[in-house]
Image: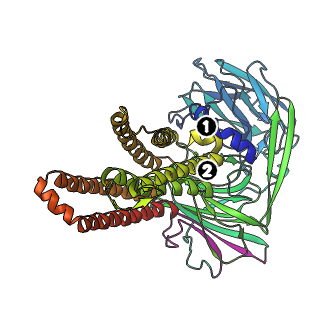
Amino acid sequence: MFATRISQFGKLLVFLLLDSTADGYSIGAPQSTCWTRYPKHKGLGTQVSSSPFAITFSKLTYTPGAIIFVTVEDPRGRWFSGLQIAAYRASGNTEEIVGEFVAYPLDKFKALTCFGGYRNMVTQKNDVKIQSVKLVWKAPSDNVGDLIFRATVVVNFEVFWIDVEGKLLSASQDLTVVKASKYKPIIFSHMVRDVDFAECGETKGCFVYPRHCNLSECLAAVSFQHRPDTDDYQFEMYAIAENWVSVGFSDDLIMGHDETVSCVSNAGLVSVQHGWNPHYHNERLFNRFLTEAEIKHSDGRVQCRFVLPRQSSVYHIIQQSEQLNYTNTTYDRDGAWHLMLAWGKAMPASDVMTIHKDMPAVTSVKVNLKDRRLYTGSGFPILVHLHASVMIIAWVFLTGIVTVMSRHYRDWLPKRRLFGTKVWFQVHRELAVLILLLNAIGLFAIFLHYGPGIRKYSVNHAYVGLAAVTALSLQVIAGFLRPGLDHKMRWYFNWSHRILGQASHVLAATTMFLAYDIDYIIKEMRNFGITVLTVWVVVQLLWHVVFELLAWKGRSRSSAEVQAVSEESTSSWNLHTCLLVIYTIVLGGLTAAALLAFLLF
């Protein structure tokens, strides 16, 4: 794995210039949308007008095992290119998909197998437009009561309707012969008693984010408590979020193969959803384990309460053409897990979650859910922390000193030599090499963590950052190849060296500001970081003005004054030394503040 990352590192520039993301599915809805049925077309919402499309049946009622012809069309002949349709119980467990599609136009459609059935959903497999489609559906072998066929109909990328419905009644209305679902429906109730984190560390364990927050005033938090009598776990969580908050149970610090529970509230629709993260996205699952679910959404805060058994599982169907593969992963809450907290928005007019913009918070250590401890964590992995730390030290602290030394301290400590040359030159050169080394470490660390996927997260920051590192590399190389004092190119070298150095510093400052513009940076961190960087820029400019004024004052003296000053050179350079010390301390303070702006989160 490590060797693979190293080999990829050399391809960074190529990867940053590529972007293969796609939000549309012209080949049909993916397997993961069995319980969402919502096209995520660049965040576009469903149409709010009444759907012109209708679902009709060859019979008004069904009997167990009956064959029913299902037609989807607009009576006025409107064309459409996409469809996703399935039959659900009208009462009881309304998440359960029933029946089987036994025939459909093979040139346009394909069947999906969702949990609990076989070929129980149909979707398109291309974007060819049609005006009508007739599907053949076979009823389940038992009477499962009245049914509702729900469809998503896509006209084009921008125009689609979700929850287009058609009701198919059971031929027998005798409720005593209706076969109940194997799984109890999850009942949601409005939360009356707000979540309470006052007893964190005493009667229950908690994970709060960010590290420095007050328990009841965090950006996000989750509490957990083992109930020995029923051998299950009660969770409470909240987040300052527009629509949803989610907790994940992960075996490592990286998102992927994690069980999740999400609480969603949007436009009057509420749900507590079981799910999992196969990679960097969440898939909603059929609810089989959640109980005692409560949810509330008010004052910009989503909060909820629910219970999970000691063990639950994620049942995943992998469909490749006609072949089906199944995986069933068990999650045991008696084990130790990294807890993840994420929050965000839902798709318009639905309880379907969109991808989070803020970086999810993860506990620093694995959590024993029976512990009554207070846990903290970060939204950023260790390699991202390393990247930010070395870059801040290099550009906020060291680069300022390097620039000032070469510009204003060429005559500093004139009687001393360091390794045979002037002190300012050795300090300037060695710090420049150190800055380049820190940049190399930072670049390697961030790419080692994200790999080619870095282009999806911070393109502008990455582009300008690479330009800054490139300029710095050229600057250091040129410094080692500088012509002699009496060479005819020395004047040109001095000016180009100065311009390139200032350009790399400006590019680095721009890069740091762009870092706080990355989508997954939370607002509090962004505001703190930009404030610190703004103060740093102002301080840098003010100090340069001070140094330039001192230099101008020295150049404007008459020859007599110069002679007098030369006799007081020691006290004059003591002043310069004091200014350099003060400048270094100020830069150190700003560096600490910039590090704090990042490390607190």
Separation of marks 2 and 1 at Cα, in angstroms:
12 Å
Q: As displayed, is residue 598 above or below residue 91? A: below
Residue span colored magenta: 203-229
Q: Nearer the viewer, residue 138 or 251?
A: 251
Left/right placement of residue 483 relative to residue 273 reads left
Q: Residues within 10 Å of mark 1 (few under 14, many from 20)?
A: some
> Looking at the picture, how far across and down is residue 357, in whole percent?
53, 48
Residue drawn at 74 percent across, 24 percent down: 109
Give amino acid for label 1: Leu
Left/right placement of residue 203 relative to residue 399 reads right
> Looking at the picture, how far across and down is residue 72, in whole percent?
67, 25
> Looking at the picture, how far across and down is residue 174, in whole percent?
81, 48
Q: Which of 532 and 271 is in front in this view?
A: 532
Give the SS element for disc 1: helix
**Which quarter of the picture shows residue 325?**
top right
Q: Nearer the viewer, residue 130 or 453?
A: 453
Task: Name the colour scheme.
Answer: rainbow
**Res 522 seen here:** no
> Looking at the picture, how far across and down is residue 232, in whole percent?
76, 70
Give the SS element for disc 2: helix
**Res 508 seen here:** yes
Give yes or no for contact between labels 2 and 1 (Cβ–Cβ under 8 Å).
Answer: no
Give amino acid for label 2: Ala
**Which quarter of the picture shows residue 288?**
bottom right
Residue drawn at 78 percent across, 78 percent down: 229
Answer whether residue 226 is magenta in the image: yes
Identify the mark nearer the N-term, 2 or 1.
Answer: 1
Left/right placement of residue 266 relative to residue 424 reads right
- Report which residue position mark 2 lands on: 445
Say which mark, if any, is on residue 12.
Answer: 1
Answer whether residue 594 is magenta in the image: no
